[in-house]
Amino acid sequence: MNILKSVKSFFSSKVRSFSLPWSTQTNSMSKSEALKEYKRYVYTIVNAISDDVAKIDFQITRTLKGGDTNVVTNHRFIKLMRRPNPDYTKRAFIKLHETYMGLCGESFWYIVRGETTKMAKYLTLLRPDLVDVVIEKDKTKNPLGLVSGYVYHNDGKTIPFDKKEIIHFKNANPNNPYRGIGPIEAAVEYVKTERLASEFTMNSINNAGRPSGILNIKGTIGQEEYDQIKKRFKTEYSGTSNAGKTMIIKGADQVDFVKLGMELSEVTMRELKEMSRDDIMIMYRTSKTMLGITDDVNRASAKEAKSVWFENVIIPRMDTLVDGLDGFIMDEFKSEDIELSYEDPSPKYLDVRSEEWSLGHNKWLTTNQIIRERNDFLGTDVEEVEGGDEIYQSIALVPMGTPKATPEKTPPKDNGKSLKKKDNCGHDHSKIKKSKLDINVRRKELSRKEFGEIFRAELFTRQKQWATKYQQGLNSILDEQKKEILSHNRKTYDDWKFDPKKYEGKYLELFQKLGVELFREQALVALNAAGDTETIFEIDSEVLNYIAERVKLFSGQFDQETLTYIDQSIGEGYQAGESISKLRKRIDSIFYDAKSVRSERVARTETIAHSNEAALEAYRQSPMVAGQEWSTESGACEFCQVMDGKIIGLQTNFFTVGETLETLDAAGNPISMVFDYTNVTHPPLHPNCQCSILPVSSDAMTKILKKAIKIKKKVKKQEQKATE
């Protein structure tokens, strides 16, 4: 039963007010002419596209309270699309829709609603060449020129439709924004050339394969006889339909036939047709392989061609279809928070992926990465293995050449006093390695710069060892966060994130323990540099509070940075319509960068801060130290160079939060640094800074204070004289 015929009586009884239709045709080819071109290469191309698009598998996802989502398998829209109307199944309906899109560049869906429920009952397609778009021409009523409705011309009758009764799909048409433009209209010259070449070839064969020629009339004939010959030649022997005919004139003397063209075998019709075919394929963004032309095609290139076909042709058309239906879905099911999507139809080749997994295993792919990708690919649920997120290498791998032998060093003598003592935390100092060099013994022999370099080398050699431990700790937490994300069902956007609150306690537990051990070791280096062999460094509440606050600061910023990267990358993936497998790769990439670059930077910065804080706390606990001196490494930045040699008290800040350090760069341009992270009580001044603080003795501090007082008095006298 034809749906349109069943509703004719309904529309004939309605009184509708529409303005005249807006001009809807292009100058090059009408919609009716475009539909007639559904043959030859155009048929093959459009049929191939519509066949694959018609395989679309619609999905409805509903958002529940709390943000969770679930796939609705029996939604009313899914039921409607299974049988859009009594005459069409879903696949046949979508195929005809895509055929209209491929020929005319537009398609009109009429929504037949129930008279009582007003809900969509059927969907039917209207021929695009029989539909006019109605625009209200009165600018006072329609200043924006919006569509008012549609008119369908069928069997001599005009049927008007309200705007909401029609879903209008159309390709962008800059010359007529109300109508779509199809590839046929855009490629009209190529299509006509291919058609005429085919007709010429066929008619030449039918007419014995002889080419046209020139009639040479010798002598003199009358005007009436000449006009008769001319008229007959024009009507019977010109045009592609008469190609190859030879004219025979009965009873005419002095008429000679002169051959004009080449034989059909000499005419490059094949090349012309192939050239036109290739032009048409370009307009549809297809390839010869997808049309069954397999010259010079191997298995690998065929797979690549199919992947490109789905990526550049089929998926964009499916996206257009889903985008056009979104408005209908939103209007039809207003009370439901639902989203329309579809299963990714891209081909999946197991042999290609298996080869990639085999080549990349333990090179750029971990075991668990391969397991996850394979699960997504095959729909399996193989569990990940413990330790499978690391890349392993054979123990047989050794470096080329012979490594340098490291001479054994004589361990420092135990003086039998301080190294065997325990502090009030119960820590045995005999288990802490003493400094490699008692630089305080040679302090008087060294310049300030030499002393600073030796102290810094000793402090930072140990710091690098601790940085490795800190990075390992960070990476263990990153592994947990990644595993949390990939274990989610990924029903919502937030399922691609981890909960930072879960890891606050883990950060504190892990890094407070590491921090305490680092403090004890680096404090011993600082006390040795100060010449203090009697003081036993204590882990007091101030030290524990410092470590806890520092862990809270860096872990919060570190997690927030990771979440920001996830938010940006997954957002881009959602906008691009990427599959779950591709989104997983984005997560892998984010955590790979976090474990290789970001964790190293944070571990280095934090252990430098902890090492300098340990030195400062050691100076505070030593009766021999009254101040600290900023010591800059060679080749330091402009900001650190300004700080070199600056001396302050042990309870004083070099900078407080909100202060600014100003200086000049190498070119003499002013530059500044604002301190908005925490108070600067010691180095580092910035990430990767390797400055240190040297101990300043009580005597030295006394001399510095006396000198400062003298300078202050001198400046005051000069100011008084200036005012007098």
Image (tube, rainbow, N blue to C red):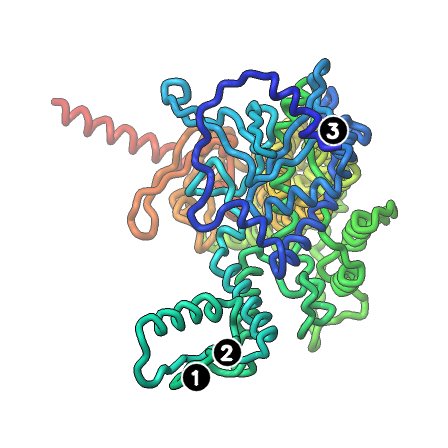
Left or right side of 464 for 394: right
Q: Residue at x 53, y 18 (%)?
A: 16
Left or right side of 300 for 18: left
Question: Which image quadrant: the N terminus?
Answer: top right
Question: Which image quadrant: the C terminus?
Answer: top left
> In terms of secondary structure, where does tag 3 sit?
helix
The three-letter amino acid code for the residue at tag 1 is Phe
**Mark 3: few, some, or many residues within 10 Å (few <14, many ≥20)?**
some
- Identify the mark at residue 257; answer none if there is no mark: 1
**Mark 2: few, some, or many residues within 10 Å (few <14, many ≥20)?**
some
- Identify the mark at residue 246; answer none if there is no mark: 2
The three-letter amino acid code for the residue at tag 3 is Phe
Residue holding disc 3: 77
| Along the line of sight, the residue nearer the viewer: 554 or 380 | 380
Q: Which one is earlier in the sequence, the residue at label 1 or at label 2?
A: 2
Q: In the image, residue 375 lies at what x, y percent?
A: 82, 48
Q: Which one is earlier in the sequence, the residue at label 3 or at label 1?
A: 3
Left or right side of 619 for 373: right
